[in-house]
Image (cartoon, helix red, strand yellow):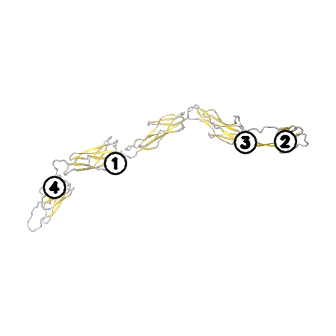
Amino acid sequence: AGTDVTLKLDNGSSITIKAGDTVGTVTVPAPSDDVFIDKSTQTVKITDATGGNFEKLEVAGNGATTMINDTIDKVDVVLTATNSVGEGGNIVYTASLVDKNGASVTNITNPLTVTLDNGQTITIGVNQSSGSVTTVAPNDVYTGDQTVTTAIKGVTGGEHFENLVPGTDKVTTTVTDTSGTADTTTVTLTAPSAVNEGGQITYTATLSNKAGTDVTLKLDNGSSITIKAGDTVGSVTVPAPSDDVFIDKSTQTVKITDATGGNFEKLEVAGNGATTTINDTIDKVDVVLTATNSVGEGGNIVYTANLVDKNGAPVTNITNPLTVTLDNGQTITIGVNQSSGSVSVVAPNDVYKGDQTVTTAIKGVTGGEHFENLVPGTDKVTTTVTDTPGTADTTTVTLTAPSAVNEGGQITYTATLSNKAGTDVTLKLDNGSSITIKAGDTVGTVTVPAPSDDVFIDKSTQTVKITDATGGNFEKLEVAGNG
């Protein structure tokens, strides 16, 4: 430069190039740092050039262009809330935009939507640094002050911010209890409508609101139910009435007698308790007959009828007396509060050699209407009756025949025992014939021709006698009569 050169720039600055120099400079601030995405270019041009003593001084080029880079600045979305409010009052939630220094940031782009975890939304409009929403404080069922806690769930619409960060801190409002009518919480007891005897009954207690603290419920069956804080349901399981063999279908009602805890303003028991039908399960009871195993002739045979369950254990009759009829005509009574009954009969003193047996069975049972399934036993019982030494018992056999027959006709001789034959009996007659009486019978016969018909007068009598009698298994067999 021959003399000082002064250059005016379109950004309002100027540069001086001293005489004798070729270069001059000026320094200006770049566009200020902000929180928005605004990377850009800036071109500055010379608008006037004077001095230098040049014959002709011209501006070359189209100015100087500089890229202005963004620096990433964070903006927090901070949530605040009313500190304290009475039940039914208003809680105000405010979402504010603040920079790293805690200073307010104005939203200059598009509206921001801040969603809270209670479902409400806050809008921070254009040219605003905050927004608010109001909600009604709950009028709860609990005693004393309660708290309501809320947080930011998410933010939308902040695409033009360099780094928009939703706050993670929760805000808490104290909701003070208001005097007046207490809010009622109810507890209801339920149970299955029906269970089988010997099973289980589960009683369930349900609150109309969550328990603030543990709730303890006492039942009139001696049980208790605890509903834990934060829950609405609790239960207890108890045995149903025990399984038995009698017809006793019934209902069982259980009620809540006392309810404490829960931190409720007012806790009431709803309903009339829980009613369950106890169904009968059909259990069989057998009537089992036993008898003396062995007894001598003329001794006592004891017959006993026992009540036993499916496991063979004795069952006590708690209803009315049972009558067990035997096929020998005897009866046995099983009284109330007894599990068996007996009857004695005299063993027969029979006419046969050796031991004999007596077999008896149950014919029927009456009085068992209250049992679920009373089954008379079908097994027969047998007693051995042993032969006793001493005088033998006599069985007689008698021979009879028609008082008269015509000559040339037939004569039938009939032998009759005074007792049934134990084995076949063989009788020899003095006319050379024989008669067999089969085992179990008392009569046998034989038919022989009468004397032959002739032309002479010879009416006569004929007497036939038993000459030998064997068999029958009798202690003593004798021929009676004179043939």
Tell me the CA gap for discs 2 and 1.
125 Å
User: Eyeballing the image, is 5 above or below 286?
Assistant: above
Q: CA distance from mark 2 to mark 4?
A: 170 Å
The x, y position of residue 337, in whole percent, is 33, 40
Q: Which is more toward the observer, 200 or 5?
A: 5
Q: CA distance from mark 1 to mark 3?
A: 96 Å
Label 3–label 2 contact, CB within 8 A: no
Dot placed on the residue nearer the N-terminal end, 2 or 1: 2
Local packing at callout 1 (Cα closer than 10 Å; few below 14, some 14-19, many 20+) is some
In space, the residues marked 4 and 3 are separated at their CA atoms by 141 Å
Find numbered disc 2 in the image and state the secondary structure of the residue it sits on: strand
Q: Position of residue 161 (x, y in %)?
A: 70, 41
Between discs 3 and 2, the one toward the N terminus: 3
Q: Marks 1 and 3: which is nearer the front?
A: 3
- Between residue 336 and residue 390, name the one nearer to us: 390
Where's the C terminus, which quadrant? bottom left
Question: What's the distance in space between the residues labelled 3 and 2, CA to CA?
Answer: 29 Å
Pointer 1 residue: 375
Residue type of the residue flagged with mark 3: Ile
Residue named by callout 3: 37
Mark 4 neighbour class, 10 Å CA radius: few under 14, some 14 to 19, many 20 or more: many
Looking at the picture, which amino acid does disc 2 mark? Ile
Q: Which mark is residue 46?
A: 2
